[in-house]
Each structure stands twice: as structure tokens, then as C-alpha cells.
Amino acid sequence: MFNQREYAARQRERYRAEGLCVYCGSRAVIHGRTYCIRCQNSHVASQRRMRVRRVAAGLCATCGDAPLTEGYVTCPACREKARLYQRARKAGKAASGA
């Protein structure tokens, strides 16, 4: 017998294998994504609202844990993490000739 988390994970994998949205399971996904256009738009809007609430509360827009630093909407840890990610991404593109 599966618990709810295992059941949901198997359901998402089945939807993914069938090319269906892993959130609603009823519509085809956007090319190269795992959500349909309706669920993708809903998810993006939800993330925007969460970022606005976090900044209004004086918290990091990314993690929501640390307090903001003057002049930024993210904490130093999240800025450093983003900086490292962007450097690695840029290096990967340069290496592939893109």
C-alpha cells in the first residue's frame, strides 16, 4: 500500500510519461515543460504573489527566510547562490559555443 506522497509521485510520473500536465493531468504539456499552459500561468501568478508578500514582509523574495538587505529584494545567501548559478551557466554556454 502506498502513502499519499508515493501515490502522487507515481501519478506525476505516469502523467509525465504520457505527455500530460503533471499538475492537472488533463491537458497536453507545453513543449519541453511539465505543465500545460493554464497550470503554468497559474503557477507563475502564484509565485509572483508570493514574492510580493515576502518583500512586503521584509523577507527575502527567493527563500522567504532571511531579512532583506538594504537596496535588494534577496538575502546575501540567495544572491550568492544566484551569482554562482549564472557563472556556471555562462561557462557552460561558452564551452558549448552558444
Image: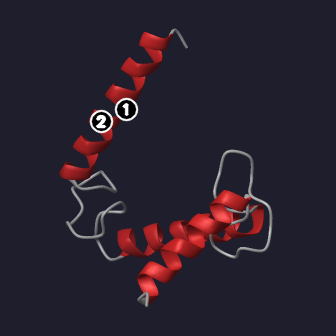
Name the quadrant of the C terminus: top right
Name the residue beneath numbered marker 1. Answer: 86
CA–CA distance in space, label 1 to label 2 = 5 Å
Name the residue beneath numbered marker 2. Answer: 83
- Numbered disc 2: secondary structure: helix
| Residue drawn 43% across the image and 76% down it | 53
Residue sitting nearer the eye, 19 or 44? 19
Q: Judge the density around disc 2: few (<14), some (14-19), many (≥20) Cα neighbours within 10 Å.
A: few
Specify whether 52 is left or right of 77.
right
Residue sitting nearer the eye, 2 or 46? 2
Q: Is residue 94 above or below residue 7?
A: above
Name the quadrant of the N terminus: bottom left
Q: Amino acid at mark 1?
A: Gln
| Residue drawn 57% across the image and 65% down it | 13
- Numbered disc 1: secondary structure: helix
Specify whether 69 is left or right of 19.
left
Q: Where does the image place residue 41, in percent across and percent down from the top left?
A: 69, 65
